[in-house]
Amino acid sequence: MSSSPLRVAVPNKGSLSETAAEYLKEAGYYGRRDLKELIVSDPRNDVEFFYLRPRDIATYVGSGALDVGVTGRDLLIDAGSDAHEVAPLGFAASTFRFAGPLGEFQELADLQGKRVATSYPGLVGGFLAAAGVTVTLVALDGAVESAVHLGVADAVADVVETGTTLRKQGLEIFGPVILQSEAVLIANATTKPGTETLYRRLQGVMVARQYVLMDYDLPSELFEQAAAITPGIESPTVSPLKDPAWLAVRVMVPIGDVNAVMDALYELGARAILVTPIHAARI
């Protein structure tokens, strides 16, 4: 046990909140039962959880008030805090791009001297400064798609999914990708005991969500061909069967590839192909 609990910041609402809570629960931590709870103690794991606005988490962690947190990479960069990214967490992916009126902008340099509306002035301002492009940033809270139509800005910088919302406002994407964001685990300069355990547990959840266990029986002379289909994380686990001409193979397979891999193995000659979910893992 550490001298004091690991203090963890968790998003209290928004797109990050629900999945972050699920990850922590699957990692064996005690979560809040009432959405109004702001602080939850988990003495069994020597952790305290603080439920905060996602935008504030990087500031709290960077200042040292809290030890680690779950937030978006975009929010971390935008905050400009002293917190740093420990590892990506594999959910809440988003892409930031520039957009402007149809045919008006072709490349980043075309923004020189223009007004750019965004909800992430720190992130966008830093990107433009690094590219040597000077603009007037118009900071807005929330959706920025209407900023050009209403005359507040010449272009916008925001999260882009399909681009449908932008097209409805008469805008098109241009220039380079500003950022590929996702949920990340962040920490401050002081690595508190328990941080590594938290990361390993969350990593185990990611693996459990991304892979399944596949077992199959196979004529031994076909093993090398089967191993090419199912290489696993390091290599397949192989066990002999009563019939010396056959082998039993166990391997981890990406969950999105399961049916295609099963088809390929069956065509090769594998039989008794079984798939089992992974509930927890350490890789």
Image (cartoon, helix red, strand yellow):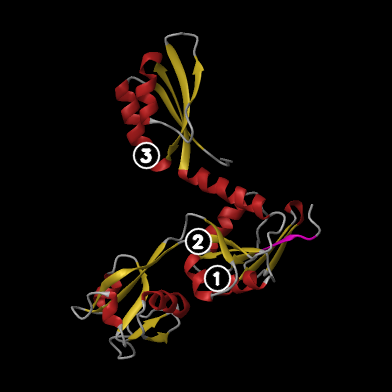
Dot 2: what SS? Answer: strand
User: Disc 3 and disc 2: Cα gap in Å?
Assistant: 24 Å
CA neighbours of label 1 inside 10 A, class few (<14), some (14 to 19), many (20+): many
The earlier-in-sequence mark between 3 and 1 is 1
CA neighbours of label 2 inside 10 A, class few (<14), some (14 to 19), many (20+): many
Looking at the rendered structure, the kind of residue marked 3 is Asp
Which residue in the structure is indicated by mark 2?
Answer: 183
Q: Which mark is residue 271?
A: none
The earlier-in-sequence mark between 3 and 2 is 2
Which residue is rendered at x = 31% and y = 29% of the image?
A: 264
Provide residue 267's location: percent of width, then percent of height.
Answer: 29, 24
Residue 6 highlighted magenta (yes or no): yes
Dot 3: what SS? Answer: helix
Which residue in the structure is indicated by mark 1?
Answer: 54
Provide residue 29's location: percent of width, then percent of height.
Answer: 66, 53
Q: Magenta stretch?
A: 4-8
Q: Is residue 183 above or below residue 131?
A: above
Which residue is rendered at x = 44% and y = 76% of the image?
A: 126
Q: Is residue 237 above or below residue 24?
A: above
Looking at the rendered structure, the kind of residue marked 2 is Ala
Which residue is the extreme one toward the bottom?
151
User: Disc 1 and disc 2: Cα gap in Å?
Assistant: 10 Å
Which residue is rendered at x = 37% and y = 14% of the image?
A: 221
Query: In front of the other: label 3 or label 2?
Result: 2
Residue 152 highlighted magenta (yes or no): no
Which residue in the structure is indicated by mark 3?
Answer: 257
Which residue is the extreme one toward the left?
103
